[in-house]
Amino acid sequence: MSSGDNSSRTRARRQEIFPVVAPCDPEARISRVPFNRPFVSGDELRNIAEAIERAHLSGNGVFTERCEAWLESATRCTKAYLTHSCTAALEMAALLLDIRPGDEVILPSFTFASTANAFVLRGAVPVFVDIRPDTLNLDEDKLEAAFTDRTKAICVVHYAGVAAEMGAIMALADRRGLYVIEDAAQAHFSKFQDQALGTIGHIGALSFHETKNLISGEGGALLINDPAFVDRAAILREKGTNRSAFFQGRVDKYTWVDIGSSFLPSDIIAAFLWAQMQNAEQIASRRLHLWERYHAALAPLEREGILRRPTTSAAAKGNGHIFYVIMRSAAEQEGLRRWLLDAEIEAPFHYVPLHSSPAGKVYGRTSGSMAVTDDMSSRLLRMPLWLGLEEDAQDRVIHEVFAYARQA
């Protein structure tokens, strides 16, 4: 058989495995297994060309409208607004909830800096509460002890796309008259008791960063679940003007009416995102397939007590965003990381807990022990998982994890 025949068969097999994704170079074989590699679904460049032809490259173009309508249909939120990042969506949430200097916002320490920064920028104090050892989400049983008369809101993070215990958290917030923000950056397609994450609290925030399940390079969305916030959100996103109302014909001219900033993404970003949304079901299915392969393959090592796999729950439907392992010690976590790196496999740890970070010590405070956060963060390692990860490359990762376990 000629090399040309082999090449054709390889391309056909790749198309069979990845019917909706296209690698940047179909002929290239990746010897190194990166933690993440952005993949396109097929129509991104065509959509961008269409946006250019339409001569509307700023925000609120036709692709922005399509993406927002898709989000509203897919999540059943009251209103979706695209933003240039999940960080921007969280900052908008802080503005909408009128977070002020001296207010306190409860959140986990095991999260990205943006979760806290959104409130620190408004002068509020992030109050860090420990996480549960099973889901690595905010421990709802430790919230009561964190409340003071300055508590204004709870910001929940759905780590790895697995839901926090939203039933208990919402009930507690309702009794206390507190707002709930969902940092659902990692939670596309995830649900809690059949309700989309990001739509249970008063406000939700999504990310379309290139590491997420749906991507646009950079990008995010604000999900409004309380109708009272819809109109003001449009004003905040448009630099504090009533520009949206003007284009809807509700005012005869637009002007500065409130505080705000430039939170809109370009319609070129939305054009890229729209192609991903058009293939959302296939993307979700593929990521879950890869996640489940890891979960099944590494089960023997969990039974032997060498590592722990992610906890699964029928009530909290995950989305295959992150597959992590928790090693027995920080030394074994670092040992496995270095072992995989020597095999040209990139498997990073995750957050340095915010309460132990330089800025966290200045701007925030802890409520109670952070023992679980400290312990889990020191032992967790994330495996490569991205849309175009081929199964032979994933098998390499699994093989090396077993090899490290056996020699360790």
Image (cartoon, grey):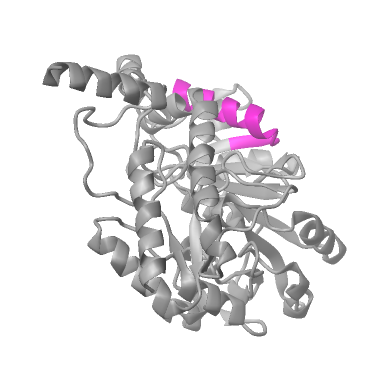
Question: Looking at the picture, does residue 226 appear above or below residue 1?
Answer: below
Residue 54 is left or right of residue 113, and the answer is left
Rendered location of residue 256, percent (x, y)? 52, 43
Residue 290 is left or right of residue 310, and the answer is left
The span picked out in magenta is 61-80
Q: Is residue 119 visible?
A: yes
Q: Is residue 240 visible?
A: no
189 or 29, which is in the foreground? Answer: 29
71 magenta-colored: yes
Rendered location of residue 47, percent (x, y)? 36, 20
Quarter of the image where the N terminus is located? top left
Give the residue at x 77% y 77%. 149
277 or 22, which is in the foreground? Answer: 22
Give the residue at x 38% y 45%. 394
283 or 100, which is in the foreground? Answer: 283
Question: Looking at the picture, does residue 147 appear above or below residue 37?
Answer: below
- Magenta: main secondary structure equals helix
Question: Looking at the picture, does residue 103 appear above or below residue 55?
Answer: below
